[in-house]
Amino acid sequence: MLRCLIMGAAGRDFHDFRTFFRSHPDFHVLAFTATQIPFIDARAFPQSLAGPGYEDDIPIYSEDRLPELIAELDIEFVFFAYSDVSHEDVMHKASVVEAAGASFVLLGPGHTELRSSKPVVALTATRTGAGKSPITQWLAKRLVEAGVRAVTIRHPMPYGNLSRQAVQRFASYADFETAECTIEEREEYEPYVRAGLVIFAGVDYAAILRAAEAEADVILWDGGNNDFPFVRPDLGIVVCDALRAGHETHYYPGETNLRRADVVVISKVSGARRAQLVALHETVARLRPTAEVIEADLEVTLDHPERVRGKRAIVVEDGPTVTHGGMGYGAGWIAATRHLARPVDPRSHAVGTIKETYARYPHLESILPAMGYSPEQIRELQETIEASGAEIVIDGSPADLSRLLDLRIPIANARYAFVQKNGPDLFELVMSRLPKRPA
């Protein structure tokens, strides 16, 4: 029996365990490590989800302990199982593993993708924050309006009790309360519910897929970070961020997605320089010449622009996009500048783990990441906002912070919306790949 450890971040790591490792019992997992996401390393992967061959829960440790864990547990193979990491950083981690005497392994789609009985359209990206979720939401709504039962499965975000999060279905705001969702989970699920759509997520993606298939004519996969899908797609749509041209070949596994793409959507084109667009088109033509290419924008709307002009505003942005995603701003900042707000600098008012976030991500300057991975961190987010002296909050998070924070300061919500600019019509491309329904 080969002694293994899985490096993860509460997502692909658990899925890889339930696909590859459960079907290859010669590889025995003694531990997981966790990184990227706060507060997820002080728990265990439950035996009830681990299955045969595991008599106890599998411990989860901080990735900082990786070398000592390899030694203490006599680990032979370390499997890397998370996303949105530069190619250079992946190989630094491989070097740490090999220096400790173990082998470093990456599992590919062939060993980890599930098969669906329904057509699957997967939306993935080359970087976190490229705009795949607004496109998935737009597509889901268009399909439902056309009479197609479209159900979305989201890349996992199981940051709480894993046993209770095996299969999650979200169709109402009450579902978020029942599941005790963090801000980060609500950022991904809430836009679907707001649009009257259904979205699934969790830990056990075989069971999740079966549940979604029971309600669907077509399955949409809304990817997390820049990971590749958990379900084999019939049509793969990959989103490249025009504002981060070059990243598509420098981050794992975003380049994998690009090299497999059927359709490439180049997003945020209006804000990009011509040189960025030319470079992206050249890269796509070189790495995936058979892909259809579409240019698009993420247009920003603000629900209460009259509240903003001339006011001291604290700008809150989607947490993952501006932290490990590396973006310095998002929809909130665009709305603030467009509507002539006076943004305040939140850094000097940050408390607790919010202050630690600024130290970890020094590129963040005039925006506040919507960090809320625990009740304590949500309270610290509220304290930071209230201490800022702002007259209004511009909420660029996809979640509705007014439902989570008890603020005395009014909130204006900034949202992204997908708008195609050129190329073959994306909706028609998708419809052409779906089986013809009986008249």
Image (tube, rainbow, N blue to C red):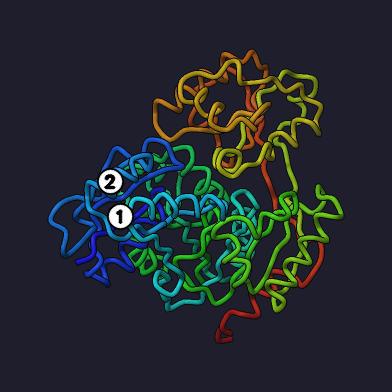
The quadrant of the rendering that contains the C terminus is: bottom right
Dot 2, crowdedness within 10 Å: few (<14), some or many (≥20)?
A: many
Residue 322's spot in the image, x, y percent?
61, 39
- Residue 314 shows in the view: yes
Q: Which residue is pictured at 34% across the width and 55% down the height?
A: 6
Mark 2 to mark 1 CA distance (whole Å): 9 Å
Label 1 CA crowd tier, 10 Å (few <14, some 14–19, many 20+): many
Quarter of the figure that contains the N terminus: bottom left
**Front-most of 3 and 391?**
3
Front tag of 2 and 1: 2
Residue beneath disc 1: 5
The residue sitting at 50% across, 69% down in the picture is 219
Left or right side of 156 for 243: right
Number of marks drawn: 2
Q: Is 109 placed above or below 191 here?
A: below
Q: Secondary structure at mark 2?
A: helix
Compared with 388, 135 (above or below) is below
Front-most of residues 248 and 410: 248
Residue 184 point in image, percent of width and height: 49, 41
* Mark 2 lies on residue: 69
**Are discs 2 and 1 less than 8 Å apart at CB?**
yes
Instruction: Tell me residue 187's x, y (percent).
Output: 53, 43
Q: Residue 407 versus residue 67: which sits nearer the camera?
A: 67
- The amino acid pointed to by label 2 is Leu
**Residue, x 62% and y 48% (percent of image)?**
129
The residue most toward the right is 274
The residue closer to the viewer here, 356 or 299, is 356
Amino acid at pointer 1? Leu
Quarter occupied by residue 391: top right
First along the sequence among labels 2 and 1:
1
